[in-house]
Image (cartoon, grey):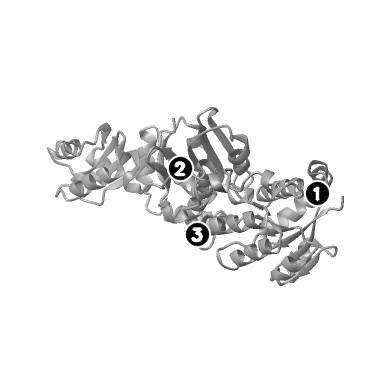
């Protein structure tokens, strides 16, 4: 059989890695796919750079639509990124009867419903392993490996930039702004790191995992998204003293009332494997009713790790290229006419436990007033830690930190209680609230 011909849109970090790995391992990949896979055409605005990356044997153009229009191209790989032109090009490729492989989590999290519907109608595949957790094959695990299970919950460290920052803050006791600058200097953080540090990137990824796990449409707009910019070094230190580490988690859970879909900093017990994922590494924990808890760990970004996932998709598409569309694995694991109508729960309805830090006046009766107010709200306390005043503000300080761990409570109930606590004259600063995930 003649090789499958691939057109590459974008030859940046991931694109060049994909070309290199495909070249280096071409015989092994051919043996697995059953036929050759060749990148024969590349589109990039920087034609000179693209030619330097792929050599003379590959046609390089500046217009991505020329790749889509080429009748010899079987698969279009979209590595441009973003929501704009990438959406137009992916939909045009589908309309032209091309299969699509993409690493674009933002595009699929926001426009996935439209894109998957178009691909289903046209009988082509959209493969996106590289969109979540880089080289970790988590999409394949959810779509195929765990297909016997009713997935109960997923919790993941799925953004390497924020995990690197939190690891450095914990190891060195530095504040967020200082570590962010270092992460940018080392190349772990972009010049504009907003999507990473505000949790948006992680929310794109957990939105896709949630859709596959629970058979719901992609609903990024329903996700609760919170980043790490407001985390203080002392909270990381206090968490450590209490036996926890703070991680930015993407969490999605199946509940009787609906699906939880959220990204935020979380206290994770330090004995959990997920708590010990350091630096820029990624890890995803999946809990299924039959298999129990499984962990997937590895590099979540980078040229060749992400290329590994792109090429795995190319092999999958090649194997199924001639198969009846009805017998392929559905894009979101569930057949389109069997999708669930479970709603994504508003954050006020989520039930979890909490770490609270209150900066209070160091005077008699404050602790009793705080705990009494929480008790009146029906919020059960798991542990209380009060720092010595001189430890918080130096010798002669009249302020101290009060740290409270709660048992499970509804977020809306806690919000009301925190408003009452914040109004107390003895509470001297905005209350810090960080959610806690036991992951058991």
- Of circles 3 and 2, the one toward us is 2
Using residue 88 as the reference point, say whether residue 356 is left or right of it.
Answer: left
Callout 3–callout 1 Cβ contact below 8 Å: no
**Label 2 – label 1 distance at C-alpha:** 38 Å
**Label 3 – label 1 distance at C-alpha:** 33 Å
Q: Nearer the viewer, residue 207 or 270?
A: 207
Which type of secondary structure does the marked residue at label 2 adopt?
strand
The residue where tag 2 is placed is 252
The residue where tag 1 is placed is 24
Q: Is residue 106 at all visible to an observer of this figure?
A: no
Q: Earlier in the sequence, mark 2 or mark 1?
A: 1
Q: Which mark is residue 193?
A: 3
Which type of secondary structure does the marked residue at label 1 adopt?
helix
Residue 396: % across, % down: 19, 44
- Identify the image quadrant of residue 384: top left
Crowd band around label 2 with a 10 angstrom C-alpha radius: few (<14), some (14–19), many (20+): many
Q: Residue at x 44, y 33 (%)?
A: 439
Residue 12: % across, % down: 67, 61
Q: Is residue 434 at all visible to an observer of this figure?
A: yes
Q: Earlier in the sequence, mark 3 or mark 1?
A: 1
Q: Earlier in the sequence, mark 3 or mark 2?
A: 3
Q: Residue at x 32, y 40 (%)?
A: 355
Residue 317: % across, % down: 72, 49
Q: Nearer the viewer, residue 200 or 399?
A: 200
């Amino acid at each position: 059989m003649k090789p499958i011909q691939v057109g590459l849109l974008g030859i940046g970090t991931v694109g060049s890695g994909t070309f290199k790995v495909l070249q280096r391992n071409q015989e092994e990949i051919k043996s697995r796919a059953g036929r050759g896979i060749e990148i024969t055409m590349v589109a990039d605005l920087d034609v000179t750079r693209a030619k330097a990356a792929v050599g003379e044997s590959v046609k390089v153009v500046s217009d991505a639509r020329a790749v889509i229009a080429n009748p010899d191209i079987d698969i279009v790989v979209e590595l441009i990124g973003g929501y704009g032109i990438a959406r137009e090009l992916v939909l045009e490729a589908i309309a032209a009867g091309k299969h699509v492989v993409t690493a674009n989590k933002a595009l699929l999290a926001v426009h996935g419903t439209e894109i998957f519907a178009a691909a289903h109608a046209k009988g082509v595949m959209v493969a996106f392993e590289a969109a979540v957790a880089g080289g970790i094959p988590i999409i394949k695990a959810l779509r195929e490996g765990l297909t016997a299970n009713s997935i109960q919950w997923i919790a993941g460290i799925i953004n390497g930039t924020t995990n690197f920052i939190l690891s450095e803050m914990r190891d060195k006791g530095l504040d967020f702004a200082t570590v962010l600058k270092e992460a940018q200097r080392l190349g772990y953080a972009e010049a504009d790191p907003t999507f990473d540090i505000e949790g948006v990137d992680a929310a794109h990824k957990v939105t896709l995992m949630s859709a596959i796990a629970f058979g719901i449409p992609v609903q990024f707009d329903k996700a609760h998204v919170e980043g790490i910019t407001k985390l203080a070094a002392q909270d990381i230190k206090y968490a450590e003293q209490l036996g926890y580490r703070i991680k930015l988690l993407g969490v999605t859970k199946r509940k009787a009332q609906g699906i939880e879909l959220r990204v935020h900093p979380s206290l994770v017990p330090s004995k959990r494997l997920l708590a010990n994922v350091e630096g820029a590494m990624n890890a995803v924990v999946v809990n299924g009713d039959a298999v129990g808890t499984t962990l997937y760990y590895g590099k979540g970004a980078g040229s060749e790790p992400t290329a590994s996932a792109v090429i795995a998709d190319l092999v999958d598409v090649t194997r199924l290229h001639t198969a009846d569309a009805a017998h392929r694995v559905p894009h979101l694991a569930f057949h389109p006419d069997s999708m669930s109508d479970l709603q994504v729960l508003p954050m006020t309805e989520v039930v979890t436990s909490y770490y609270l830090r209150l900066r209070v006046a160091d005077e008699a009766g404050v602790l009793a007033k705080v705990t009494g107010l929480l008790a009146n709200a029906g919020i059960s306390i798991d542990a209380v830690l009060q720092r010595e005043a001189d430890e918080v503000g130096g010798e002669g300080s009249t302020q101290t930190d009060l740290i409270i761990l709660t048992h499970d409570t509804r977020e809306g109930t806690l919000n009301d209680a925190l408003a009452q606590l914040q109004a107390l004259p003895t509470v001297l600063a905005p209350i810090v609230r960080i959610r806690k995930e036991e992951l058991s």
